[in-house]
Image: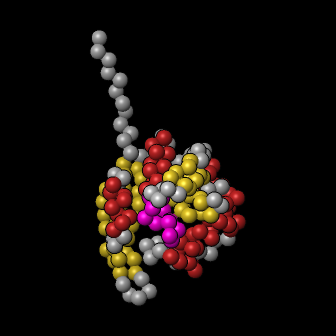
Amino acid sequence: MAYTPDTMITLKDGIECLLRNALPGDARDVRSFTIEAAKTSEYLVMLPDEITETHWRTREKLKRYLDAEDELVLIALDGPMVVGQLMAVKTKRARLAHGIDMGIAIKDGWRGRGLGRAMIEFMIKWAETAPRIERIELHVHSENHTAIHLYESLGFEHEGRRRKAIKYADGRYMDDLIMAKLLDRAPRLDIRYI
C-alpha cells in the first residue's frame, strides 16, 4: 500500500500545511483543485475544459493509486483547502515499471513559498522506500525556470528536450524538457575486517 504518514510542514513564511495521501473521499476537492490549477498556471499541459472526468471516476482512480504500493497521489492542505497536489504514477509496461512519472501543481498564491520543494522531498523519501522504484521522471516547460532550478537542486538531471512540443492558443511554442532522478539501488556491501 502507498499509505504515507500524515506530515505537517512549515513553509518559508511560517504557515503550516498538512501533507497526506489523497483519499477517495477527496475526489471532489482534488478535481476542483485540478481545474483551478489548469486555469491559473500556463505551465500545465491540460486546459480546464479538457478535465471532463467525473468526481466518481476521480474517486476510483484515487482508490487505485492508494492501493498500489508504488504509486502516490499526495495533497497539501491548508485546513480543508487543497493547495497542492503531486502525482507519482508508473506505466503499466513491464520494461518501464521501475520508473514513475511525477507531476505537481501548486495553487496560485501558494507558489514560491517552499510547498513544491516540501512535496517533492516527501515523494523522493517515499520512493526511496519503495523497492521497485529506481527512476523518477518529469516533464517541465522550458521557460519555467523556477521549477527547473528546483528540480536541479533536488538532484534531477536533464535528459532530453522535445522541441516545440507545447503550442499555446496564441501561436507561441515552448519546448518540453525531460528530467529524471535515478535512485541509488546499488547493493550495500557489509565489509568487516578481521
Farthest residue to the top: give it.
194
Name the residue furthest front.
14
Identify the residue shown where x is 36% and y is 48%: 182
- Whether residue 84 is visible here, answered yes or no, is yes
Q: Quadrant of the N terminus?
A: top right
The x, y position of residue 187, in whole percent, is: 37, 33
Number of marks in the rendered image: 0
User: Residue at 35% of width from left, 81% of height from top?
Assistant: 173
Find residue 86 and report its horizontal and vertical position in percent.
Answer: 51, 59
Q: Is residue 114 magenta?
A: yes
Residue at 31% x, 67% y: name it.
161
Q: Could you say which quadrant of the image residue 160 lies in?
A: bottom left
Say above or below: 81 vs 93. Answer: below
The structure residue drawn at horizontal position 56% and vertical position 47%, both measured from the top left corner, is 7
Q: Position of residue 127 (x, y in %)?
A: 47, 46
* 27 shown above or below 39: above
Quadrant (top left, top right, bottom left, bottom right) of the C terminus:
top left
Asked whether residue 41 is drawn in magenta, I would say: no
Regarding residue 98, the answer to whether it shows in the image is no
Q: Is residue 111 above or below residue 122?
A: below
Using the image as rendered, state which of residue 168 and residue 15 is in the foreground: 15
Q: How is the image coloured?
A: secondary structure
Q: Nearer the viewer, residue 116 or 103?
A: 116
What is the magenta range? 103-116
